[in-house]
Image (cartoon, grey):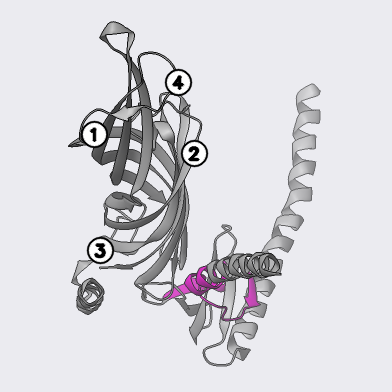
Amino acid sequence: MRCIGFALGVVLLAAVPALAQKVDSKGVPYRAWDVDGGVGFLSLTSADSGVGDEGYSSDIWNPSWTTSFDLGHFWNNHLKTESGVSILQRHTTWSNEIVPLAGGQRGHVATTNDIQQVQVTAAATWQFFENTFAHPYVTGGARFGLLQIDSTSETYLFPVSGNGYPTRSSEPVHSDSVKARVWPFIGVGSKSYFNERSFVRPEMTLAFNGRGPSQFGARLVFGIDF
Amino acid sequence: MTNCRRFIGALVVLALSIPSAAMAQVETAGEAERWHDLAERLEPAALISVRLKDGSRTRGTVVGVGSSTMTFAPKTRIPVPPRDIRFDDVASIERTKQGMNPGAKVVISAASVVGGMLAIAALIFASGID
């Protein structure tokens, strides 16, 4: 059903007449809007992809397939501002914590985090050349990560003395939370046209957190100018 | 005496430069005529690449030839009106071919990469079965 909706949207956009076509101060014609969607991969450090208390070092990279959609507005023949949404694969992290209890007993809290991350991007893009079939471009902006986290914690108690298996002290505890993060990013790509309006856009991006590069992505999206 | 020498020197330089400038002008005129002849001999809808003396290069087709200008329809993504190009401004005219569009090239490249990766994965999988 989604596919039919998307295809219908593309057909409707293709049917939009040349009303949205503009001409810049140098007389170069361009279309004011573009929309695209596609797939790719995004590899994130655990600091960016996880809850943050998994106990992993930040340089462990977790790859994820992504599905993304973008809408852009051209202010002139070269400058575009763009916003987009990327949906990452759901993934699971684990954390363990030993908790000292009264009477010398120790508790072991095991937490499983099921994380769904969606990233919203806001970017400015500068594309090179004028009215050609291939426009290399550079882009940069901010990427906002929204992490929907479903956590399940189980507490085990170790025997006070001697050997033995820990026993579960209570029923698992479920909790939902949302975390938001923001990272700056840069990217390069090429908007390559099939005809006057439809295009494919290969792109590579690099995002940064406080410790340096923390996300590397590549994607291929198909779109249309209108 | 020194002033006189300077004046004579300047005259000599001027005298030497006049013939070369005139020659360059004659050369440009001859060149323009050759570009005119070439443009006239092009068959209809022939795709050419025109480089102008200002360094710019454009691909397109010649849609009309006048005595001193040719009407040129640039091959752009969004169609633009044909424009007149003076033969005096032309540095070169070359025939060119209609290539595959960049979008198709990207898709073919991406498909090749994915196909290659799948083939490698299939080989690894097959070797694992044995």
Q: Amino acid at mark 2?
A: Trp
User: Split into 4 quadrants, where in the image is the N terminus of chain A?
Assistant: bottom left
Q: Which numbered disc covers residue A156?
A: none
Which residue position is annotated with label 1? A179
Dot in front, 1 or 3: 1
Q: Where's residue A48, x and y in %?
A: 38, 34
Q: Earlier in the sequence, mark 2 or mark 4?
A: 2
Q: Where's residue A158, x and y in %?
A: 36, 21
Which residue position is annotated with label 4? A163
Query: Do marks 1 and 2 share a subunit?
Result: yes
Category of crowding for the residue at label 1, using alpha-carbon neighbours closer than 10 angstroms: few (below 14), some (14–19), many (at least 20) = few
Q: Judging from the image, what secondary structure is the residue with disc 2 in? A: strand
Which residue position is annotated with label 2? A61
Q: Earlier in the sequence, mark 2 or mark 3?
A: 3
User: Split into 4 quadrants, where in the image is the C terminus of chain A?
Assistant: bottom left
Mark 2 belongs to chain = A
The boundaries of the magenta stretch are B83-108
Which residue position is annotated with label 3? A22
Question: Is A76 situated above or below B27?
Answer: above
Q: Are marks 4 and 3 in contact (CB under 8 Å)?
A: no
Mark 4 belongs to chain = A
Q: Residue at x 60, y 89 (%)?
A: B42
Dot in front, 4 or 3: 4
Calculate the distance from the C-alpha at mark 4 to the C-alpha at mark 1.
40 Å
Q: Earlier in the sequence, mark 4 or mark 3?
A: 3
Q: Residue at x 68, y 72 (%)?
A: B31
Query: Do marks 2 and 4 share a subunit?
Result: yes
